């Protein structure tokens, strides 16, 4: 059976890595479900969601010239039509795994959390650099 993009297929999880899960699709074909395509919710440890031997329904996202097959479990789940249009920018999904929706509990959305993290990280790195590279050069803290 030829695997085509957009097709929904049932397969069996044959291997799990820290970045995703390999799914046997039959006919000696194996695809990869990236960890970001396992669930609509954030998945820190894929072992919390999948185990080897699980039967899963996946949607084929891509079939490469090299034979690599990209799969998604979360996109294989049918949802009400209106939820597909909550992405913004004319219905096009935004980057990241939250697609602009807020996390449960009223927390900030992922994009703003990431922006705040980057801003704070850059500030901390600048402070560390400033404290370790005094006017005289070299290492060590600033002298008063």
Image (spheres, grey):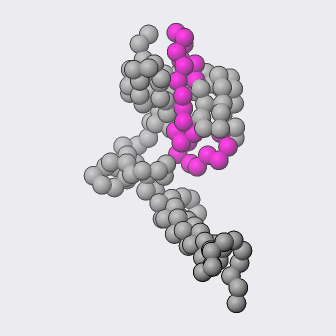
The reply to whether the magenta stretch includes residue 30 is yes
Residue, x 62% and y 74% (percent of image)?
137
Question: Is residue 67 shown left or right of residue 117?
Answer: left
- Residue 60 in the image, given as x and y percentages of width and height: 44, 27
- Residue 58 in the image, given as x and y percentages of width and height: 50, 28
Choose between 71 and 125: the one closer to the eye: 125
Q: Quadrant of residue 39?
A: top right
Choose between 103 and 60: the one closer to the eye: 60
Is residue 24 positioned above or below 75 on the image? above
- Residue 135 in the image, given as x and y percentages of width and height: 60, 81
Residue 7: tell me if it is visible: no
Span colored in magenta: 23-46
Residue, x 31% and y 49% (percent of image)?
91
Residue, x 52% and y 39% (percent of image)?
37
Is residue 51 positioned above or below 12 on the image? below
- Which quadrant of the rendered structure holds the N terminus? top left
Residue, x 61% and y 46% (percent of image)?
43
- Which quadrant of the rendered structure holds the C terminus? bottom right
Choose between 98 and 65: the one closer to the eye: 65
């Amino acid at each position: 059976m030829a695997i085509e993009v957009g097709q929904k297929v049932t397969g069996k999880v044959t291997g799990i890595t820290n970045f995703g899960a390999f799914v046997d699709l039959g006919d000696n074909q194996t695809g990869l479900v990236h960890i970001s395509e396992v669930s609509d919710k954030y998945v820190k440890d894929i072992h919390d969601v999948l185990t080897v031997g699980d039967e899963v329904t996946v949607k084929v996202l891509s079939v490469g010239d090299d034979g690599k097959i990209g799969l998604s479990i979360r996109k294989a789940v049918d949802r009400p039509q209106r939820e597909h249009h909550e992405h913004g920018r004319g219905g096009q999904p935004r980057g990241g795994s939250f697609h602009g929706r807020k996390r449960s509990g009223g927390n900030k959305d992922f994009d703003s959390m990431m922006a705040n993290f980057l801003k704070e990280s850059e500030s901390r790195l600048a402070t560390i650099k400033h404290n370790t590279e005094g006017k005289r050069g070299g290492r060590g803290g600033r002298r008063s």
